[in-house]
Amino acid sequence: MKRIVTLTLSPTIDVSSHVDYVVPERKLRCAEPLTEPGGGGVNVARALKRFGADPLAVFTAGGHTGQRLVELVEEEGVAVEPIAIDGLTRENVTIREDASTLQYRFCMPGPSLSRAEWERIVGVLESLDPAPEFLVASGSLPPGLPDDTYAEIAWLANARGIKMILDTSGPPLQAALDAGTFMIKPNLSELAWLEGDAWIEDEEHLWDAAHAVVREHDCHAIVVSLGAGGALAVTEAGALRIPAPPVRPESKVGAGDSMVAGIVWGLEQGWTALEAAALGVAAGAAAVMTPGSDLCRRDDTERLHAQMRERRQPLAAIS
């Protein structure tokens, strides 16, 4: 059995292209589209494969789009465990306007899941034998599942000694905080929502809010992603503010999933959560350098991580 398993309850097929201008009420002749598998956990598994890991991607798949999703993930050499559902797997579209370099992202709703389909998912997770070391649950919940869905998964993982890393938002994230999650990765607005604040006012407020999550909930670590500002990682053992390396941006799509993959890869190598978070920042920055919805590349990640180490930050070396 794999040491790393990713779970995606609402995966997607991502279609990306570009056009000279985006204008209303006209047919826009786009360039040749790029079709890629997508969804939080699916993307994390794809990025982990690029690092040299051998993850198992567990995700729902329905209809002809679900079958195509399975094919796309397998084409990248990632082991898959598709869970059949009745609804059609969704598709998302990302269009870049060449004149402004702005991106327009159209995210479609996923199909609803029935109770029987949910029980099928639980059965797959319970049957993982031996239990993996890490379970990465990432992405939004599909319609039909309650807010405590990720909490139920966290309880299951915790009971089996699996470290669960969760990347989601809103009530599903809040519900999972006291269920034994190993790590969460909110952004600034998600952290503010968790703490009941309208926004994070300054650096001191950021540190206080992140420490409160670890101190007040059953959560070992939090990595707050700050976009171009890097990240703040807080654990029970300490904290680390991690500036992002400067890069020339191409697309922000996939940066968050790449960041999670970098963190998990570092943890899988035996690094501390703080050291792994620094690698995650490098991976997120590497993803920003790639076009469309492409993920981080290992050579870019290694180079950026080395640059971060040269600034004398307390970071581990990638192996």
Image: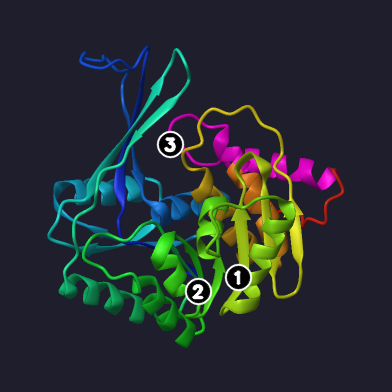
- Check contact, mark 3 vs mark 1: CB within 8 A: no
For the residues marked 3 and 1, what is the alpha-carbon distance in whole angstroms? 31 Å
Tell me the chief SS of the magenta region.
helix
Q: Nearer the viewer, mark 2 or mark 3?
A: 2
Q: Give left or right: position of 316 versus 200.
A: right
Q: Which amino acid lies under the numbered mark 3 shown in the image of this protein?
A: Ser
* Part of the protein shown in magenta: 285-310
Mark 2 is surrounded, within 10 Å at the Cα level, by few (under 14), some (14 to 19) or many (20 or more) other residues, namely many
Q: Which amino acid lies under the numbered mark 2 shown in the image of this protein?
A: Leu
Q: Nearer the viewer, residue 286 or 199?
A: 199
Earlier residue among tags 2 and 3 = 2
> Which residue is located at x 46 percent, y 87 percent?
159
Mark yes or no: residue 270 visible: no
Q: Which amino acid lies under the numbered mark 1 shown in the image of this protein?
A: Val
- According to the picture, the residue beneath numbered tag 1 turns out to be 213
- According to the picture, the residue beneath numbered tag 3 turns out to be 293
Q: Nearer the viewer, mark 3 or mark 1?
A: 1
Q: Nearer the viewer, residue 130 or 142?
A: 142
Q: What percent of the width, then of the height, locates residue 303? A: 71, 39
In the rendered structure, find residue 177 and report the number of the disc placed on it.
Answer: 2
Is 20 placed above or below 3 here?
Answer: above
